[in-house]
Image (cartoon, rainbow, N blue to C red):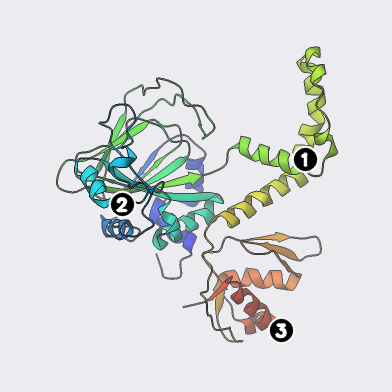
Amino acid sequence: MTSDATLAETAWRQAFGDLPVEDGLALREGTAWRHVPGPAPGHHASLLSVADLDAFLATDAARAPRVSMADSRREGSAAVPRHEYLRDDDRVDLPGLFGAFDAGATLVVSQFHEMHPPLMRFCRGLEQIFLHAVQANIYLTPPGAQGFRVHYDTHDVLVLQVTGEKRWRLFPDQPVPRPTRRTPWPGNLSASGEPAALTLRAGDTLYVPRGVMHDAAAQAGDAPSLHITIGLMDPSFAAVLRLAVDLLEETEPALRETFPTWRLAEGPGRLAEMARPLAARLAEPAALERTALELLDRLAADRPALLGRGLFVPMPEEGTRLRLAPGVLHVLVPEADGGASLRWVGAQLRLDARQAGWMERLADGATPGELGDGAVDFCRRLMRRGLVVRES
């Protein structure tokens, strides 16, 4: 990847190699898992190391619920009891944690993208492509050990094998199609069918859609298995429709009418008759557009800012070459007068038609002098907000 690659391009190549983006999006819309062999054993080494975990465990941030441990050999739940590796105040008890790890328990560090910049940038790059939240959990498993028994996840995942090897089994049947966090876990659920088996080696990536039953065990030997599980936190249609109804209720009096429960005995036809006009309102472009913008606003607000500036930043001059900050999630929404609204983690910016055109040119890189009169002040406003950076 060249030095001028965007954050999104770098993250895509890291995860999917040479797979075209359209093929990757089609993969997300299907139910098949996919193994992406790594170009070299050190392919994912820039994202994380065991030394990074050691450094984290020595800080006060190493505490529950971010830190947990699991061991599939335990009776009942695979979760290691908290008192074996945590103090009473939820901080990590390092001697206890090391003892549990040496005995075969897997170390789990959740949401590590929130505090580890390489993972934060990687997740942000994928968020710019998928337009939904992306998270990173870490799993360090001792040689020959297994953290979790056969299970499925309630969101799609990318598994990035950093060091060591892990033997995976992926089962063909999906007993709960497309589960979400709101889907009840069936009792006594077990995998069926002959599983596909593969060994994930350092540098490899594995894509596993939600609902696919699987398990994984570290290979025997001297080296532990370190992998990153990237959670692709896309909303379901049900979640989007719930949001659409909530937003429409603010402006649609019919949704605030009393629901006549006394009419339920008149049969389902009567209920359908009452609901049909409201369903049509939900499908109107204005309601759907408002829902889409709300989803984008929430994504920008919920993720780390990754702005293109620090506490002090020199202001650009007419000849300073600038580019939109690669880590900022933003969207330019056209308006009827030819202008646009810039939606991002900060307050919305109202742009006239000329400024909207400048934003498009800054995506590819430009100087204020190339943009025209008034562009210096405009670019300084963007610089103060962290929306542009100097090209290196």
Q: Which residue is mark 1?
A: 249
Under circle 3, the secondary element is loop
Tag 1: amino acid: Glu
The residue that appears at 29% across and 37% down in the rendered structure is 216
Residue 149, above or below 251: above
The residue that appears at 44% across and 59% down in the rendered structure is 120
Percent across and percent down for residue 171 are 36, 28
Tag 3: amino acid: Asp
The Cα–Cα distance between marks 2 and 3, rounded to whole angstroms, is 49 Å
Q: Residues within 10 Å of mark 1 (few under 14, many from 20)?
A: few
The Cα–Cα distance between marks 1 and 3, rounded to whole angstroms, is 45 Å
Tell which circle, 1 or 3, labels the residue nearer the N-terminal end: 1
The Cα–Cα distance between marks 2 and 1, rounded to whole angstroms, is 49 Å
Foreground residue among 357 and 224: 224
Left or right: 377 in relation to 71 = right
The answer to whether any part of residue 17 appears in the image is no
Tell which circle, 2 or 3, labels the residue nearer the N-terminal end: 2
The quadrant of the image that shows the N terminus is bottom left
**Image quadrant assignment for residue 52:** bottom left
Q: Marks 3 and 1: in contact by CB < 8 Å?
A: no
Percent across and percent down for residue 231 are 45, 45
Tell which circle, 2 or 1, labels the residue nearer the N-terminal end: 2
In the orientation shown, which residue stands out farthest toward the left? 221
Residue 4 bears which disc, if any? none
Which label sits in the foreground, 2 or 1? Answer: 1
Tag 2: amino acid: Gly
Q: Which residue is mark 2?
A: 38
The answer to whether any part of residue 93 appears in the image is yes
In the orientation shown, which residue stands out farthest toward the front? 88
Percent across and percent down for residue 43 are 31, 57
The residue that appears at 57% across and 60% down in the rendered structure is 329
